Amino acid sequence: MKNYSQREICLVYLDSFLGLEYKHKRNLCDLVERDYTVSELIKNAKDYLLTNLGENEYNTILESAKDVYVDYLFDNLTKNGVSVTTVFSKDYPKSLLKTDCPPLVLYYKGDISLLNSELFAIVGSRKSLPSALSLCERYVKELVEVGFVPVTGIAEGVDAKVLSTALSVKAKAISVIAGGLNHVYPKAHCELIDKVAKNGLVLSEYPPETIPKPFHFPVRNRIIAGLSKGVLIVSGAIKSGTLYTAEYAEEYGKDLFAVPYGVGVLSGAGCNDLIKRGAMLTDTPKDIIDFYGKSAPKKQVQLTDSEREIIRALKDGQLHVEKICTLLNKQVFEITPILSILEIKGIISKSGNVFGLIRNDLEE
């Protein structure tokens, strides 16, 4: 478990009061001096608390400002394998600090250093078509291949497909959930979240024991958008909760992409509306990859000695099949099957009976 500064401890303490409005926590956060203990913070904030919350609330908070309560909070985090990062922490994501209402505390399991990666959000409706889920899988595989770490929620449909696909190709992923880390919703995805925590990162802005409420979900989406370089909406009806993420992306000036749908497809009507309003249309991962000027790394291929001979023969340029035969002292029927295999492997191309190398990065 991490060692926390007094400022971080004060924020975790303030954040434990779920009934205390964000604006008050934020204002109290501004009063935290570097070496304040929790009790010193509350005493120094007495005037503010009395003015804004009243004497009863002030006395309740003051009564809790003791080491025994603070120890309980952090012992509970340790017990549940949860760490925190705060707006005072070095590992807090800088992209969130630029948003209007950054979480004062983020509770997490997994590798917090992933927040320094190139993050890209992929979200969509719980009620997505099978074809949309298949397309989502393709986007995840190709985007992680060029270095993006996908960010999503944990709902059924697209969110779960993003996470399971990343795990299947041994890639990292980040899930931002809408309740405490001890109350994953839906419960059916607890095992999936455990796997993401072990191989990537799971985040929440709520203390571990917080039960998710309906209003937590749209508010949570601001974190997904805020963390990410760009946002892809795979599916969503006109009134889909997914569109909250798109709205936050627009508000934060993030690159927004949406998959187009045919007329009358309800689960894609929201995507079409986003495209009408300026979101970038994408029907293939290459659109996003090209937009960011990226290219997939060349995959290593296994070559036979006969294949290497042909590749060496083509190093200096395109050759007619008969010229290749002459150089290698072979008959056409001997090299034709090898040429076909090299085409399938994406190493050479054919124009009539003339062959040329596509890839020049192969070891001989």
Image (spheres, rainbow, N blue to C red):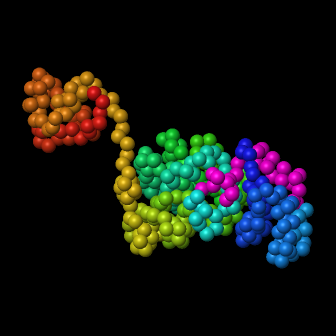
Q: Position of residue 200 (x, y in %)?
A: 58, 45
Q: Is residue 209 visible?
A: no
Q: Is residue 243 left or right of residue 16?
A: left
Relative vertical location of residue 161 with respect to residue 328 in this rendering, above or below: below
Relative vertical location of residue 285 with respect to residue 145 in this rendering, above or below: below
Relative vertical location of residue 153 with respect to residue 31 in this rendering, above or below: above
In percent of the image, x 25 and y 33: which residue is there?
341
Which one is in front, 128 or 158? 158
Please report the bounds of the magenta region as a residue range. 64-93
Relative vertical location of residue 150 with respect to residue 344 in this rendering, above or below: below
| Membership of 360 in magenta stretch | no
Name the image quarter holding residue 292.
Answer: bottom left
Name the image quarter holding residue 256.
Answer: bottom left
Which one is in front, 260 or 79? 79
In percent of the image, x 12 and y 30: which residue is there?
324
| Membership of 75 in magenta stretch | yes
Which one is in front, 165 or 119? 119
* Residue placed furthest toward the bottom: 51
Q: Is residue 23 left or right of residue 359?
A: right
Q: Position of residue 81 (x, y in %)?
A: 72, 44
Quadrant (top left, top right, bottom left, bottom right) of the N terminus: top right
Which one is in front, 223 or 322? 223
Q: Is residue 111 visible?
A: yes
Q: Position of residue 345 (x, y in %)?
A: 29, 37
In percent of the image, x 14 and y 24: which residue is there?
328
